[in-house]
Amino acid sequence: MVNDCSSSRPALLAGGLAALLASTCCLGPLVLVTLGFSGAWIGNLTVLEPYRPVFIGVALMAMFLAWRRIFRPTQDCKPGEVCAIPRVRSTYRFIFWVVAALVLVALGFPYVLPLLY
């Protein structure tokens, strides 16, 4: 297994994708209607609702794994590895917090949605 920060990229992507899948039952139809799409087929997005806890678990696990790889001490990185470069570390940390914010929005949206109607 590669011991650098670039191995956290798949965990960040998996966390973001799982959060989007967890919120497709509620966020998806609203986004589609906002963009002007309509039709009875939008109601079919609720088919994924039973899998929402699984997607939430995958998202949280992926975010934890990415956090563990990105925020480990610099001493764990060997010279010449990607994670030893300060600019790369700060970029990964910024991307992590952006993805974490998006995951929180996607996971919390179904609970805030009833307040909007």
Image (cartoon, rainbow, N blue to C red):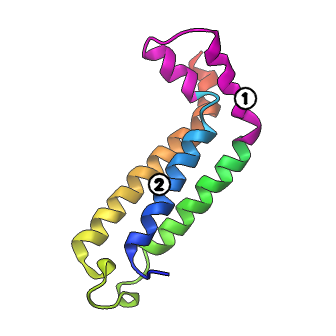
In this view, 75 is above or below 104: below
Of helix, strand and loop, which one carries label 1?
helix
**Dot 2: few (<14), some (14–19), or many (≥20) neighbours within 10 Å?**
some
* Quadrant in the picture for residue 95: bottom left
Is residue 48 a member of the stretch shown in magenta?
A: yes
Horizontally, residue 29 falls left or right of residue 50, namely left
Query: Count the marks: how many?
Result: 2
Location of mark 1 (residue) = 47
* Alpha carbon separation for disc pair 1 and 2: 23 Å
Horizontally, residue 40 falls left or right of residue 33, namely right
Location of the C terminus (image quadrant):
top right
In this view, 112 is above or below 79: above
Q: Which residues are magenta?
A: 27-51
* Quadrant in the picture for residue 42: top right
In this view, 71 is above or below 46: below
Is residue 12 a member of the stretch shown in magenta?
A: no
Q: Position of residue 48 (x, y in %)?
A: 70, 34
Question: Magenta stretch: dominant SS?
Answer: helix
What type is the residue that disc 2 sits on?
Leu
Location of mark 2 (residue) = 13
